[in-house]
Amino acid sequence: MALGLATVVILGLMVDFLFRKLRVPGLVGMMGVGVVLGPWMLGALDPGLLAFSADLRMIALIVILLRAGFELHKDKLRRIGLQAVLLAFIPATLEALAVTALGPRLLGLTYLESAILGTVLGAVSPAVVVPLMLDFAARRKGTDKGIPTLVIAASSLDDVFVIVVFSALLGLYTGSKVNLLGKLAGIPISILSGIVAGLAIGWILYGVFRRFNPRATKRLLAILGVAIVLVGVEARVEEFLPFAALLAVMAIGAIILAKSEHMAHEISGKLSKIWVFAQIMLFTLVGAQVDVRVAWQAGLAGSALIGLGLVARSLGTWLCLVGSELTPAERFFVVIAYLPKATVQAAIGGAPLIAMQAAGMGLGPGQVILAVAVLSILLTAPLGAWLIAWAGNRILKQEPLGPALGETMDADRMLEETNGGGRIPQAKVPAIRSSNGSH
């Protein structure tokens, strides 16, 4: 397994460097490496690595969502709150409805089977979108209007909504006892419980860090350990308490950022170093889940269905931004940012087929759903990542240098903390604030 891991890392670094030179996001090359080396093509990936693929991908996703949490300024969240909530539900709903209506004609599925496919396709990929948004945030592109924050927050809520509806529809189809209304009612509960738990745990961690002042590396390890435990807890409590663990993970970073921007920047800086390795694992192993032969079976009809679903999704995204402070060009960028599919589709695309097999049902519809899910990754992840990078560099305006919203207050608080509450001559403040931004 160690040799296989080393091979993936070396190849991942090489293609990342090459693709960046070609002005294409490195994740496109990493996914390509996974597709080629995966079990469906060359079969060159170590079996031990594939056995731990799900866990490694989840840890990598936790790393990127923690980084996202450390970028969620509460002031900017207040500004984009309504748009984030609308974007979490409306685009995915319109895309799923379009797939439900068109699936019987294009693919010969029933309406319920098409609805299941619609929920599979309805989720945006945080693994593709969030790293690109964090890159824009680091370069202060679009941060004056909170655009990276908007997309990060909305895409995370979007996934919670889609996965809950998917599980309810799949249960209905396979004959399981599922209370659809109860499942839908559980969506706001899972979102709220996840956010509250994350804020509470983040507040406790912040207090511990303030009290014992461990090194930034130890703070990071503690946060990572707690985040992984939260994801494990979700699977054990979901039967009696809907709980969105990944939202809790993001909330941990957000509350620490609100309490101390200096501490948050230190931890985020450490996370960015771990992300160099984690992204290779995430995108390579996501690519390894893609069976090109299965995608080929979906053919032109599957491609047409995906495209028409994205048209409906884009319309919904645009409608959510009507009345916002974004310009038409910036709204167009958000529409593009909401297109890529990868993580969720790789995770649940094969679930209907497995459920149908376990229930002794015909496997044809499950095979069609899997094929279209795989095809959606191939069509939207590489192209979507490239379009986001291309459009963001041309559309998003760079925020003028200076303290970001809420940064001045946090810098002053940091100065007080480092000096035991005593006053510092005002002339020293700019220098310390400047070093803050370098973390």
Image: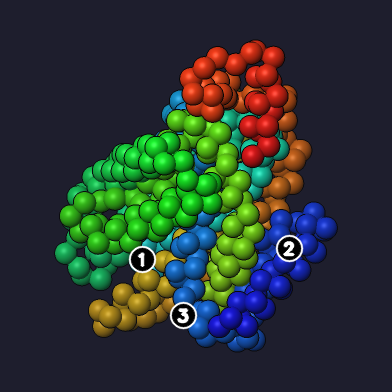
Q: Amino acid at mark 2?
A: Asp
At 48% from the left and 62% from the top, the residue drawn is 59
Q: Looking at the rendered structure, which numbered label has been put on residue 158?
A: none
- Could you tell me how far apart the alpha carbons at marks 3 and 1 are, in whole angstroms? 30 Å
Residue picked out by circle 1: 113
Q: Position of residue 19 (x, y in %)?
A: 77, 61
Residue 239 or 64: which is nearer the viewer?
64
Indicate which disc, 3 or 1, sits on the residue closer to the N terminus: 3
Q: Looking at the rendered structure, which numbered label has been put on residue 51?
A: 3
Q: Amino acid at mark 1?
A: Glu
At 34% from the left and 50% from the top, the residue drawn is 244
Locate the C terminus by quadrant: top right
Q: Badge 3: how crowded within 10 Å, few (<14), some, or many (20+)?
A: few
- Closer to viewer: mark 3 or mark 1: 3
Indicate which disc, 1 or 2, sits on the residue closer to the N terminus: 2
Q: Position of residue 243 (x, y in %)?
A: 29, 50
Numbered-mark total = 3
Indicate whether 176 appears above or below 393: below
